[in-house]
Structures are given as C-alpha cells and as structure tokens.
Amino acid sequence: MEHIKCLIIGSGPAGYTAAIYASRANLNPVLYEGPQAGGQLTTTTEVENFPGYPDGVEPFQMMDDMRRQAERFGTIIRSGIVTKVDFSVSPKRITIEDTEEVEADAVIIATGAAAKYLGLPSEREYKGRGVSACATCDGFFYRKKTVAVVGGGDTACEEAAYLAGLCQKVYLIVRKPYLRASQIMQKRVLETPNIEVLFEHNTLRLTGDGKVQGADLVYRKGETDEREVHIDIDGFFLAIGHHPNSDLFKDYLECEEQGYIKTIAGTPLTNVAGVFAAGDVADPHYRQAITAAASGCKAAIEADKWLKTKGE
Ligand code: NDP
C-alpha cells in the first residue's frame, strides 16, 4: 500500500495553500482534487477581493496559479475522489474511488461545501433541464432567455448580475422583504435594468414540458394578501447557500449541527490527532477564498508540527 506523509483532500484555495506550505516544508504532499477541480470558486465569475489581484482575476486562472505554485514545490496532484476514510488506525487509511487504498500519517481535509437546493420534487425532475446551481457553468445556455435566481445573499446577487449580462431578463426570487447581500452587490442588482427583484416570494413548483418553462411562486405566504404568481422562465438557478462536504468524516470527526467540522477555535485541529480541517468544510462564518487559503496555511504548519513531534 502506498504510504503518504501528508495527504490533502480537496483542491480549492484551502487545499492548494496547504499544499504550497506542506511541500515547502518537505512533507511530500499528495493532493486529491475531488469532484470539482479548483473547488467552489470556479463556479463564480470573477474574484475581485483576493489581495494581489488589483484588477480582479478569473477564478480558473487563480486556481490554476495556485495549482502551479503547489506543483512547483513538489506537490503531487491527482484527480480522484476520496470515498472512504478510517481515522481509527495509524497511519490513517484513505480509499480512492472505492478501489485504491493508501495510508497517510497526516491528513488535511479541505473538501469545501456544496450548493443547497430547495428540496422541491420538480427541482429534481428538471435538474440539468433548466435547473442549475452554477450560473457561471450554465449561464451560457440561457443567452437572450429569461431566468430566475433564488436567494438574497451575495451569491444570488452575483449570479443575477452575471446572468443579466447574458440573458434578456432575470428574476431574483427573495423570500424576505430585503436582500442579505453586501451593500455593493445590492446596489449592483437593484441598478441593473433587466433584473426584477421579487421580494417576499417563495417557489412552489417548476413547470414545463420536459424542461423548465415556468415557475409558480407564492407572494407573502400566510399573510392576508397571499397570492400565487406565475413567471415564464427558461432557467432556474439556486443560490441559497451551501452545506459542508463532511459526510465522509462524520464517523470519526466531531461536527457542528449543520455539518461543519469542529476545530479548536482559531486552529485547524480536529478531535483526531493528525487530522486537520481547513476552508469552508470547517467554516460556517467567513467562507471566503482568502480565509480558506489562510486556514490551509495553518493546517500545513500544524501538520508539519505534528509530524515532527511524532518523529516522522
Ligand atoms: P447566504 O447564506 O449569505 O445567503 C443565502 C440566501 O439564500 C439568503 O438570502 C437566504 O434567505 C436564502 N435562502 C436560504 N434558504 C432558502 C430557501 N429555502 N428558500 C429561499 N431562500 C433561501 O449564502 P451565500 O451563498 O449568498 O453567501 C455565503 C457567504 O459567502 C456569505 O458570507 C457571503 O457574503 C459570501 N460571498 C461573498 C462573495 C464575494 O465577496 N464576492 C460572493 C459570494 C458569497 P434569508 O436571507 O431569508 O435567510
């Protein structure tokens, strides 16, 4: 069985930053990319808030830069999804794609988080046929069409603004009477002429013959002026938040109620010695590329410290 000194799971800013630091510390890291190489960031349009890019940067470019930086110092990057772990043994056992097993002294988990769906039966029915959780990935298919985005946070506003550049019209379906997004994103959305914000609306169902052609919404549910509203749309984009990709580790690691891996405050240390958690999988609050990168750095430093105390 292959023996790895420091194994990193995930290829977002946390995973790549951990890889840069671990390889520079001679930990010979091996990084498994997971299902989405480059992580969640690759589903956004432009990164404007990562220091060092004064003119903004295209997310694929930024992740490619991080990947190359990790490889430059010797990180081995492999495509592949970790499907099972056993943290009860030392070294830890990790299974890739249900077939290959490797062992690792230290493990850095940087598996990020995944988009949430509303849970409507029609949402599942039309998945891939008009329902998407990634405007950057799928917006292209809706050029000059009408789409709806659900959510009132920064992601929803960013996706709506992106889609407004491609589509004829964008509805933003917001369940509250206000947006939760940052002021700058709210302003951008409210000032874009082809975005119509539907405050206090919830989606009841999607309609259409084999693909999304419309949505039935309810306005002010439970109030005296409650009414149903129908909109004609070709695409329905979810932007209502994320849940952490931690299911694989729950038998061994303590997690918060929402699934985020518990770490000792301000550190990437989990309840299992030699297992570290970095980035969105352990961060319900900040969830930024820069905070994820910083926690990846901390995880590699802690892994190095832990390996040295073990005499590895
Ligand atoms: P948020 O949790 O901030 O927002 C989720 C939105 O979805 C809220 O408006 C919420 O409504 C709504 N929502 C949740 N569940 C439902 C539901 N079942 N039905 C209808 N609406 C629902 O998530 P985001 O992904 O927008 O942002 C996550 C974090 O990432 C934030 O801290 C954000 O600032 C940050 N971010 C930063 C960006 C940047 O700086 N460029 C870009 C994108 C995100 P309600 O308000 O009623 O709870």
Image (cartoon, rainbow, N blue to C red):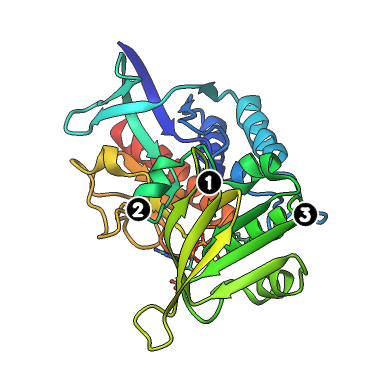
Question: Nearer the N terminus, badge 2 or badge 1?
Answer: 2
1 or 3: tag closer to the N-terminus = 3
In this picture, residue 85 sits left or right of residue 194: left
Question: Which kind of residue does numbered mark 1 sit on?
Answer: Val
Q: Is residue 90 above or below residue 242?
A: above
Looking at the rendered structure, which numbered label has been put on residue 119?
2
Q: Amino acid at mark 3?
A: Gly
| Disc 2 Cβ-to-ligand 1 distance below 8 Å | yes
Mark seen at residue 152: none
Residue 136 is situated, as x and y percent measured from the top left of the image, at 65, 45
Extreme-top residue of the structure? 1
Q: Which residue of the protein is positioned furthest toward the right in this rendering?
A: 55
Q: Quadrant of residue 223?
A: bottom left
Which of the image's four quarters has the C terminus? top left
Q: How many marks?
A: 3
Q: Measured from the top left, where is residue 1 in percent x and y? A: 30, 10
Q: Which residue position is annotated with label 1?
A: 212
Disc 3, SS: loop
x then y, percent, for residue 20:
58, 36
Residue pointed to by mark 3: 165
Q: Amino acid at mark 2?
A: Gly
